[in-house]
Image (cartoon, helix red, strand yellow):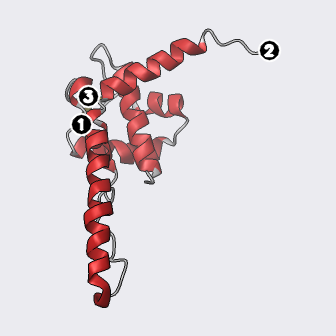
Amino acid sequence: MRISSKGRYGLAAMISVAQLGSTGEFVTVISIAEKLGISKIYLEQVFSLLKRSKLVTSIKGSQGGYQLSKPSEKITVLEILQAVEISLFEKTERSVSDEAMEIESSLKNLIWDNLDNAVVTTLGKVTLSDLVAEADKAKSGEEFMFYI
């Protein structure tokens, strides 16, 4: 499976909003762009998709920014990717000609449908809260890394 930059940035941005806005304040696109090293303009496009899917809310102005629209425990990776990855579960073209539809049917029934279901199940089990906890754990582990 290949996740586009929009999908990767969407996930990273949502983790940042959850971390930086943990006390309820709004987080600016500029602060997220600087933290992640991502173009502000591109990040605004990602946030537009996240807002359209009602995963974040925003306010404009000097004190404006974004915050999660619901607790991070209630937002799944699946929801985030569905918001920003328009073609994530797009049906692919057939693999064979009309004369070999039994082969196409076997591929669909035994591989493609099962693969789609496994991806949906896996992404639906992981929450934004899980990602934040893992990121925090990785960050705290960095403090104790020694290089020789």
Q: Disc 1 vs disc 2: Cβ atoms closer than 8 Å?
A: no
* In this view, 117 is above or below 107: above
Q: Residues within 10 Å of mark 3 (few under 14, many from 20)?
A: many
Q: Disc 1 vs disc 3: Cβ atoms closer than 8 Å?
A: yes
- Using the numbered discs, state the Cα–Cα distance from disc 3 to disc 2 in whole angstroms: 41 Å
| Residue that sits furthest to the bottom in the current view | 99
Name the amino acid type tagged 1. Leu
* In this view, 75 is above or below 1: above
Query: Which residue occupies the foreground of this view, 63 or 121?
Result: 121
Q: Which residue is mark 3?
A: 68
Tell me which corner region of the image, top left, top right, bottom left or bottom right, holds residue 108.
bottom left
Q: Which residue is mark 1?
A: 55
Using the rendered image of the protein, determine whether residue 135 is visible from the camera's viewpoint: yes
Name the amino acid type tagged 3. Leu
- Using the numbered discs, state the Cα–Cα distance from disc 1 to disc 2 in whole angstroms: 44 Å
Query: Which residue occupies the foreground of this view, 99 or 38?
Result: 99
Which numbered disc, 3 or 2, marks the residue closer to the eye? 2
* In this view, 37 is above or below 131: below
What mark, if any, has residue 148 been given in the picture?
Answer: 2
Residue at 26%, 74% in the rendered image: 105
